[in-house]
Image: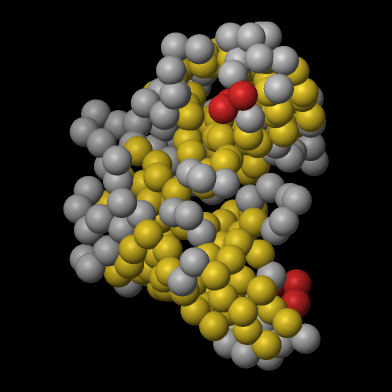
Amino acid sequence: ILNVEQSPQSLHVQEGDSTNFTCSFPSSNFYALHWYRWETAKSPEALFVMTLNGDEKKKGRISATLNTKEGYSYLYIKGSQPEDSATYLCAFISAVTGGGNKLTFGTGTQLKVEL
Amino acid sequence: DAGVIQSPRHEVTEMGQEVTLRCKPISGHNSLFWYRQTMMRGLELLIYFNNNVPIDDSGMPEDRFSAKMPNASFSTLKIQPSEPRDSAVYFCASSLDGSGGGLYQPQHFGDGTRLSIL
């Protein structure tokens, strides 16, 4: 079982605040890292797929960075809005010899943006 | 465009009954994933297929669970016999990956099936 940890577990911020959270994963056998946004009563929605050390991805006010050598990825939200309230999940993909890589989700960071 | 379609949306049944969950992936996608979501364990991968072939079924909890993908547009997850601890939300997702199931592409999730075993 691969250890994929997300911190903090939950976060309350005020509208307009910028925030960030972390996904930690094993630094060996890295293949890819996915970020998903999951709103209550909906299904997860893909944000980013990151594959290279030093990768930076951006979508609107949300961005992510990747450090495969030390085994972490940060997700940043600039100027949080109430509609950003959701659980943010990372999924670590580890390389498996022969293909058919292994996927493990973290337990998520639950973000609540208040007015 | 149609997304991943799961049925039924809700299922309530009695312990010991057979349960079949269905999934239609996005047309053209070649990888399909079954997940289970519970409060205790979060989102867990049960099994995934690439080009209709099971690649990793190490997450299938026990022999009561089985999954099939008879063609590129349909998959089933079956629980027989069902138990109360199987109660969860089951998600299906699909993606367009290379051969061998590299998991390099983002996954598109269905709306889930909420399963309650009494």
Instruction: Tell me what residue is drawn at x 30 percent, y 31 percent.
Output: A99
Location of residue B5 in the rendering, given as x and y in whole percent from the top left corner: 75, 31
Residue A52 visible in this rendered orientation of the protein: no
Q: Based on the displayed image, in which of its 4 quarters is residue B104 positioned?
A: top left
Above or below, A67 against A4 in this view is below
Q: Quadrant of the C terminus of chain A?
A: bottom right
Location of residue B97 in the rendering, given as x and y in whole percent from the top left corner: 48, 37
Given residues B106 and B44, the one toward you in this image is B44
Q: Is residue B49 left or right of residue A25?
A: right
Location of residue A23 in the rendering, given as x and y in whole percent from the top left corner: 40, 64
Q: Residue furthest bottom?
A: A16
Instruction: Tell me what residue is drawn at x 44 percent, y 23 percent.
Output: B61
Location of residue A101 in the rendering, given as x and y in whole percent from the top left corner: 34, 37
Residue A42 visible in this rendered orientation of the protein: yes
Above or below, B36 against A33 in this view is above
Instruction: Tell me what residue is drawn at x 63 percent, y 9 percent.
Output: B16
Given residues A12 and A106, the one toward you in this image is A12
Instruction: Tell me what residue is drawn at x 36 percent, y 54 percent.
Output: A4
Q: Quadrant of the N terminus of chain A?
A: top left
